[in-house]
Amino acid sequence: MKPAKAITSLKTTETLEAPDELQSDSSELAVPDISQMSIDGDEAEAFIAQKRIGSRIRNLRLKKSMGLLELGRHTGLSASFLSQLETGRVVPTLRNLARIAMVFSKDLGYFFESEPVTLFRPHLAKDRLRLPQSGVDDPLYFFESLGYQVPDRQMDPYLAIFQPTAGRTPRTHHHAGAEFLYVLEGTLTVQHGETIQHFGPGDAVYFDASTLHSYSCEGDTPATALIVTLAQQSPALTPGAANNLNSANNRFGTMPVTLRNRAATLKRSHV
């Protein structure tokens, strides 16, 4: 098989042909008019040199659970040519690339766009700030945000360390959305509305955070829990479901806003 013709410049609007062995197989296919398409040549060649076009074709194919033979039937290109294309051993022409784009309902520019940046934000223990319960002089718990470096996050995860209550009255609070709590160490009592439940290591609860709730550590040693608050509203429960699930409500009050403001201040102070 002859290798596909190399693209020396994509700044022009010349029509590039498919490999000789493919022209007879694909002559009846409807191929989009690429004469008016404008692709920056330097950028395109950089993508081709780094084999990113081939990897994008492969990712599209695998997402559709499509084999090379099936893609070949849709495009009129041989499976061996497509395999070499995906691994960067041959250079695609714009005409062949347009055929492939049509199969996946993509425009030709898709193959030349910058790769999206995937969100990945580590929050190492040595870098986190431990802050006290806000709005009180004698805090019953301390917390560390596990997501403070993520802007516009959809949830707020926290590591919370609850101090023994020792006769003190926990402060109730509530906020919009839902909350999830998982006890890591110690014993924790959660009051949610009129419901009081005791939790030990490995126990968890998911509740509606718009209902007044509070936490208390009744033991002699601190209790540690992972808490995740979600911004979305909890779905409405039917009366029967509400009785069975003991609908729930609140969290750390204004902790997310307070934490963000205080963390931002502390971060600036260390710059």
Image: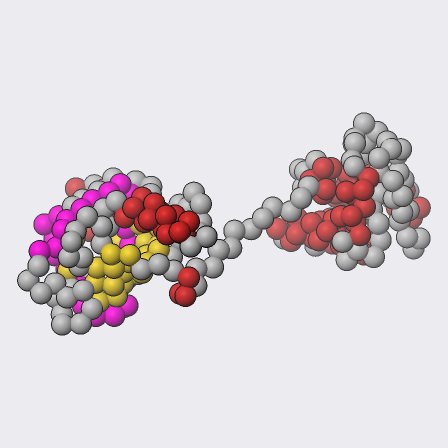
Going 14% across and 66% down the picture, which residue do you hit? 164
Q: Quadrant of residue 114?
A: top right
Q: Is residue 177 among the parts visible in the rendering?
A: yes
Between 143 and 158, the residue placed more toward the observer is 143
Where 14 falls versus 147 (above or below)?
Answer: above
Q: Quadrant of residue 159?
A: bottom left
Residue 156 x %, y %: 35, 50
Where 184 falls versus 192 (above or below)?
Answer: below
Where 40 falls versus 143 (above or below)?
Answer: above
Please say whether residue 183 is one of the residues in the magenta stretch.
Answer: yes
Residue 256 x %, y %: 31, 47
Residue 135 x %, y %: 19, 48
**Chain part drawn in magenta:** 169-197
Between 73 and 127, the residue placed more toward the observer is 127
Relative to residue 80, is residue 148 drawn left or right?
Answer: left
Going 71% across and 53% down the picture, which residue do you hit? 55
Going 73% across and 37% down the picture, which residue do you hit? 108
